[in-house]
Image (cartoon, grey):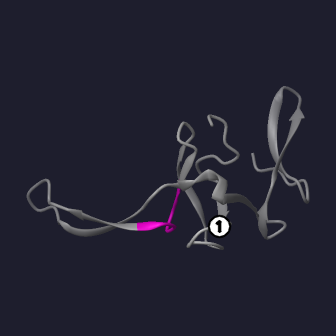
Amino acid sequence: MNNMHVKRGDTVVVISGKEKTAKGKVLVALPKKGRVVVENVNMVTRHTKPKKQGEPGGRMQKPAPLDASNVMLFCAKCNKGVRVGHVIEGDKKKRVCRKCGASFD
């Protein structure tokens, strides 16, 4: 799955799993694995040692990747998660909302 419907910086809504209805920004997109990292969603605890002197160790919270199929692009105009359509304008391919036609790019 090398082509994904979401990119880094997009606002998405989680549609399934324990974090259902959570909304956040895509921090990292991993197209080869078909996964995305969304801020403040799917948080896991990492126990880390201090690497340098003065650096704190302990329990750190960080977002873990979740499957890209579990998120939908959030349309601000519709105020909900929507499917993505594609429109070719000139020589550019743009992503648009299937409901209202608002552009994401």
Q: Position of residue 82 (x, y in %)?
A: 80, 60
Above or below residue 33? Residue 9 is: below
- State the residue position of label 1: 16
Residue depicted at x 78% and y 69%: 80
Q: Position of residue 50 (x, y in %)?
A: 14, 60
Q: Nearer the viewer, residue 20 or 10?
A: 20
Residue 41 lies within the magenta run: yes
Amino acid at dot 1:
Ser
> From which residue to which does the magenta span run?
37-43
For numbered disc 1, what is the local secondary structure? Answer: loop
Task: Please indicate whether residue 97 sits to the left or right of residue 30 in the image.
Answer: right
Q: Position of residue 45 (x, y in %)?
A: 33, 68
Q: Quadrant of residue 1?
A: top right
Task: Please indicate whether residue 54 sits to the left or right of residue 45 in the image.
Answer: left
**So how many labels did they put on this image?**
1
Residue 35 lies within the magenta run: no
State the residue lying farthest toward the left: 53
Q: Position of residue 65 (x, y in %)?
A: 49, 55
Above or below residue 36? Residue 63 is: below
Residue depicted at x 76% and y 50%: 104
